[in-house]
Image: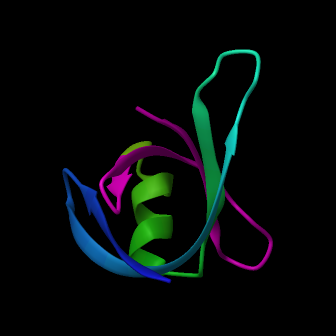
Amino acid sequence: MKLLLESAHGEYEVDVELTERVEPVDGKVHVSGRIQPHEAVVALLRNGVRVVKLGGISLRLAEVDPWGGVLVRGVRV
């Protein structure tokens, strides 16, 4: 799906696959997924940006995968 990624350095429309699950230990909804390869998002991560909003959810940019996508993780509040 296409979502708007927002950071202090700009906004980007990205293709992303997200999954959500309720963690029984803490009772919170954990979100994880992968942003399809996007040069600007990879540049954000390499320049130290970690926290972004993706579709209104605050997520952390985790790492670049071997195919150039960016893995994301977070907790829905």
Membership of 53 in magenta stretch: yes
The part of the chain drawn in magenta is 52-77
Q: Is 75 rendered above or below residue 5?
A: above
Q: In which quarter of the image is the C terminus?
A: top left
Q: In this view, does 25 lie to the left or right of 31?
A: right
Task: Find residue 2 and report its horizontal and vertical position in percent.
Answer: 42, 83
Task: Find residue 75 and report its horizontal and vertical position in percent.
Answer: 52, 35
Residue 3 picture quarter: bottom left
State whether the magenta stretch is mostly helix, strand or loop.
Answer: strand
Q: In this view, does 67 lie to the left or right of 5?
A: right
Q: Is 62 rendered above or below residue 27?
A: below
Residue 17 picture quarter: bottom right
Residue at (58%, 37%) from the top-left corner? 29
Membership of 10 in magenta stretch: no
Q: Is 66 rendered above or below residue 63?
A: below
How is the protein colored in the picture?
Answer: rainbow
Q: Pick the residue in front: 18 or 8.
A: 18
Residue at (75%, 66%) from the top-left corner? 65
